Image: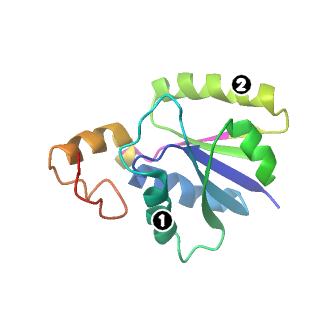
Amino acid sequence: MRTAIFPGSFDPFTNGHLDVVRRGTVLFDEVIVAIGNNSSKSRYLPVEQMQEMIQEVFRDEPRVSVQSYKGLTADYAREVGARFLLRGLRNTTDFEYENTIAQANRHVNPDLETVFLITSPVLAAISSTIIREIHRFGGNVDDFVPFQLPPFAG
C-alpha cells in the first residue's frame, strides 16, 4: 500500500491544498492530511477545529484521512507507515524552501521520498497567509477555501 502524508499547518486549509490532495489520491492508495503543530507559529484557527472542517470536506473519500501530530514530520511519517511525503509547489520560492526541508526529512528518515506536485495555475496565488489577512479584516474568502470560515474572533 502506498501511503503519503500531506503535512502542513493548514491554517486555513485552502482550495490549493484541496487540489493537491485530490491529485495525490491518483498517485497514492492513501493520503493522510497531517496537521502539524509548528512551534514557531501561533495559529489563527485551532487545530481541532481545522481537523474537523477538513474531515468534512473529505467525508466521502475513504482514501483520505485527517490527523494532527507533534514533532518531526519525518518521524511522524515513520509512525504511520508512510513512505511518501506529498507537497505542492506554487513557485520557485516554494521549491527552494521545500527542497531544503525534503533533504532534512530524508536525513531523518532515509525511507521517506518527497513528491512535489506543481500547483494548478488558477490556484497558484492562494496562500493561507493571504486568506488569513483578508478574513481578519472582514473580507470574503469563500473563493479560496472549501468551507465557510467562522467569523474572526480576534
Q: Which mark is residue 103?
A: 2
Q: Is residue 120 left or right of residue 33?
A: left
Residue drawn at point x = 34 percent, y = 56 percent: 145
Q: Dividing the picture into quarters, in which one does residue 96 lie?
A: top right
Q: Is residue 19 left or right of residue 28?
A: left
Q: Is residue 7 left or right of residue 153?
A: right
Depicted 154 relative to depicted 105: above or below: below
Q: Which mark is residue 52?
A: 1
Depicted 119 relative to depicted 30: above or below: above
Depicted 55 relative to depicted 151: above or below: below
Does the magenta portion include 119? yes
Q: Dividing the picture into quarters, in which one does residue 109 lie?
A: top right
Secondary structure of residue under mark 1: helix
Q: Is residue 27 left or right of residue 127?
A: right
- The answer to which of 89 and 5 lies nearer the viewer is 5
Depicted 65 relative to depicted 72: above or below: below
- Say whether residue 152 is visible: yes
**How far from the left and from the top, in percent, is residue 127?**
37, 40
Q: Dividing the picture into quarters, in which one does residue 105 lie?
A: top right
How packed mark 1 is, by other alpha carbons closer than 10 Å (few <14, some 14-19, many 20 or more), is: few
Give the magenta part as a residue range: 115-121
Amino acid at the residue labelled 2: Gln
**How far from the left and from the top, in percent, is residue 139?**
16, 49
Q: Compute the Cα span from label 1 to label 2.
A: 31 Å
Amino acid at the residue labelled 1: Glu
- Where is the C terminus found, in terms of image quarters? top left
